Amino acid sequence: MSARRLCLQLVCLAGLVFAGPLVAQETKIGYVDMQRLFDEAPQVQRVREALDREFRPRNEALLADEARLEEIESQLADDTLSLINSQRQALMREARNLRRSIDRRRDDLAEEVRFRTNAETSDLEATIELAVSQVARTNGYDLILTSPVAYASERVDITDAVLVWLANDIESQADSLP
């Protein structure tokens, strides 16, 4: 390698070493706590309430059937001597059928809740991604990191600004409804 080429490489390396801090000072980096957004965003609260309203009647019906099953099982345990064989058989059959029905409906409900939650979460992720992007662009950020990170100071945390954007977005949607 020629001395001239080595000298040129050293000059370039020195330029990078001295230019690096200048570029880093101009780069604006922010941080968003995604867990906090998914805990506090008004859109998330709205989805939780809607899912609760949607699935509450089925859950309450399951709870009522579970209470009925406990009642039957208690009656079978307490009245072993006073029940005639046909009554006992009928109660045992009812308990077995009720247990099967409860198990099947509980599994179906859990699967449907999981499916709906995943669908809504996907929509929320898109909205939150848009919010982070808008806040970053508006405030001149070059890079936004999301959780989990090893450490982020409050100075670079823009989670509050994103929550404000999300709150304004949900208000504007409510205002546009008839």
Image (cartoon, rainbow, N blue to C red):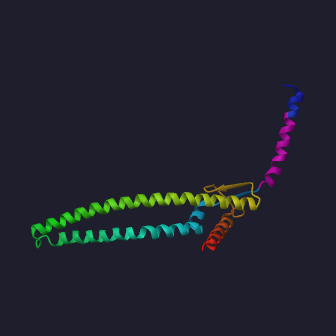
6 to 103, vertically: above or below: above
- Residue 134 sits above or below residue 16 on the image: below
**How far from the left and from the top, in percent, is residue 30?**
71, 58
147 and 177: which is toward the camera: 177
Q: Residue at x 90, y 29 (%)?
A: 4
Of residue 120 and residue 161, the one placed in the foreground of this image is 120
In the image, residue 29 lies at what x, y percent?
73, 56
Q: Is residue 55 left or right of residue 6?
A: left
Residue positioned most to the top: 1
Q: Main secondary structure of the magenta part?
A: helix
Residue 38 position in % (x across, y down): 57, 63
Asked whether residue 6 is drawn in magenta, I would say no
Q: Quadrant of residue 61?
A: bottom left
Q: How many marks?
A: 0
Q: Of residues 47 and 152, which is closer to you in this image?
A: 47
Farthest residue to the front: give it: 178
Q: Give the quarter of the figure containing the C terminus.
A: bottom right
> Which quadrant holds residue 102?
bottom left
Q: Name the residue rendered at 44%, 61% in the picture.
A: 113
Query: Nearest the camera: 6 or 81?
Result: 81
Give the magenta range. Answer: 9-27
Give left or right: position of 171 versus 6. Answer: left
Residue name at image x 86 percent, y 42 percent = 15
- The N terminus appears in which quarter of the rendering? top right
